[in-house]
Image (spheres, helix red, strand yellow):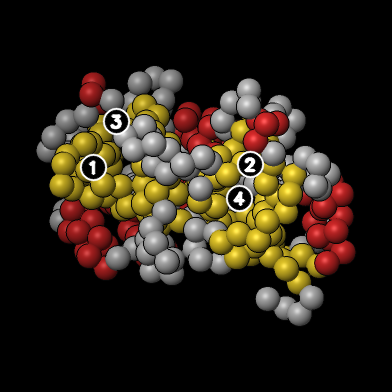
């Protein structure tokens, strides 16, 4: 960190694109991070983070609590201004906390009594939703075309107990469309693992992606899963919930194959994101062989997550 600058982790209206982001005064964005052991409550115009109370043995359901946010390098003057905005020490106190990746930052933590009746923020992600992509949405060009607000970032994660395969029947792509043309899907299977990338999408982009995935017409259905981060640069793995797209039973079949164009988009994604070599090899083998046809309808019709 440059001399005179400090790291601050923000999770609500100070995030990029939110109403109070200008209070950061052009501070340098250091990336997305997660704060473990905290819960994010919805107070209406803004959220408030509080440290989670330890759960009794057997009481907790789902992954340990964490919140999603953004890390910035700020000056002492900006930090003093944030203290005023957050009404320190009456509504919030500023704590020096370790984030999930091992870095340390200032975090504004609210008073627990102020959130006693407030609901939790879905996915602990204010203003966006973490989406687990595993198929053609791994391709940056495709996701950018579908989701104009996506910032280009992504986090490689793994999903335990799910199998990746080409078993989703695709929408007809015009004259000569092959009925055996398939797209990627995941389905529960103990002992299997599926790798993917988590993207944080704003509400408009989430609606657009739902439309691209054919949610309204029953092709895919949104499903909440628990993913685990890679531990390459972190002291420990982080577990959190994300939404993904699962093929519905009526649009699933065995024995399908990907088109050349569709397979190429997944391969572009495999090359772009830092997946383990073994996962790249596994998907490359699944996608290999003779493609059924060349599909020119890229990025616009219903393709998988």
Residue in view at x 23 percent, y 56 percent: 283
Q: Position of residue 160 (x, y in %)?
A: 26, 47
Q: Within 10 angstroms of label 3, few (less than 14), some, or many (20 or more) residues?
A: many
**Which of label 2 and label 1 is nearer to you?**
2
Question: Does label 4 or label 3 sit earlier along the sequence?
Answer: 4
The reply to whether discs 4 and 1 touch (Cβ–Cβ < 8 Å) is: no
Residue in view at x 39 percent, y 36 percent: 56
Disc 2 element: strand
Q: CA distance from mark 2 to mark 1?
A: 32 Å
Quadrant containing the C terminus in the rendered view: top left
Question: Does label 4 or label 1 sit earlier along the sequence?
Answer: 4
Residue in view at x 22 percent, y 65 percent: 278
Compared with residue 242, is residue 156 higher up or lower down, i.e. above or below? below
The reply to whether discs 3 and 1 touch (Cβ–Cβ < 8 Å) is: no
Would residue 263 be found to the left or right of residue 43 on screen?
left
Disc 4 element: strand
Question: Residue 276's mark?
Answer: none
Q: Position of residue 37 (x, y in %)?
A: 51, 48
Would residue 193 be found to the left or right of residue 296 on screen?
left
Question: Residue 49's mark?
Answer: 2
Question: Residue 247's mark?
Answer: 3
**Which of label 4 and label 1 is nearer to you?**
4
**Which of label 4 and label 2 is nearer to you?**
2
Question: Does label 2 or label 1 sit earlier along the sequence?
Answer: 2
Q: Which residue is mark 1?
A: 162
Q: Which residue is mark 4?
A: 69
Task: Point out the residue furthest to the bottom here.
Answer: 3
Q: Quadrant of residue 183?
A: top left
Q: Within 10 angstroms of label 1, few (less than 14), some, or many (20 or more) residues?
A: some
Q: Position of residue 256 (x, y in %)?
A: 17, 39
């Amino acid at each position: 960190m440059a001399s005179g600058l400090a790291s601050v982790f923000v999770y609500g209206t100070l995030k990029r694109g939110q109403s109070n982001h200008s209070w950061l005064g052009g501070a340098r964005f250091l990336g997305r991070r997660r704060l473990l052991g905290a819960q994010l409550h919805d107070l209406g115009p803004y959220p408030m983070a509080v440290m989670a109370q330890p759960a009794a043995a057997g009481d907790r359901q789902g992954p340990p609590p964490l919140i999603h946010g953004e890390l910035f390098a700020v000056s002492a003057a900006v930090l003093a201004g944030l203290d005023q905005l957050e009404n320190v020490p009456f509504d919030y106190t500023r704590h020096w906390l370790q984030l999930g990746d091992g870095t340390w930052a200032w975090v504004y933590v609210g008073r627990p009594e102020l959130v006693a009746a407030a609901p939790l923020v879905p996915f602990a992600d204010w203003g966006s939703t973490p989406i687990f992509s595993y198929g053609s949405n791994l391709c940056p060009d495709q996701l950018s075309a579908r989701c104009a607000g996506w910032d280009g970032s992504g986090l490689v994660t793994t999903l335990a107990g799910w199998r990746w395969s080409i078993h989703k029947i695709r929408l007809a792509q015009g004259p000569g469309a092959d009925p055996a043309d398939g797209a990627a899907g995941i389905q529960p299977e103990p002992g299997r693992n599926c790798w993917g990338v988590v993207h944080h999408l704003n509400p408009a982009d989430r609606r657009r992606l739902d439309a691209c995935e054919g949610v309204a017409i029953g092709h895919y259905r949104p499903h909440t899963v628990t993913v685990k981060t890679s531990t390459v640069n972190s002291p420990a793995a982080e577990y959190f919930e994300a939404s993904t797209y699962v093929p519905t039973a009526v649009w699933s079949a065995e024995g399908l194959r990907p088109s050349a164009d569709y397979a190429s988009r997944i391969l572009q994604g495999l090359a772009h994101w830092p997946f383990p070599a073994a996962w790249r090899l596994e998907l490359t083998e699944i996608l290999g062989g003779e493609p059924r046809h060349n599909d020119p309808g890229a990025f616009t019709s219903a393709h998988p997550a």
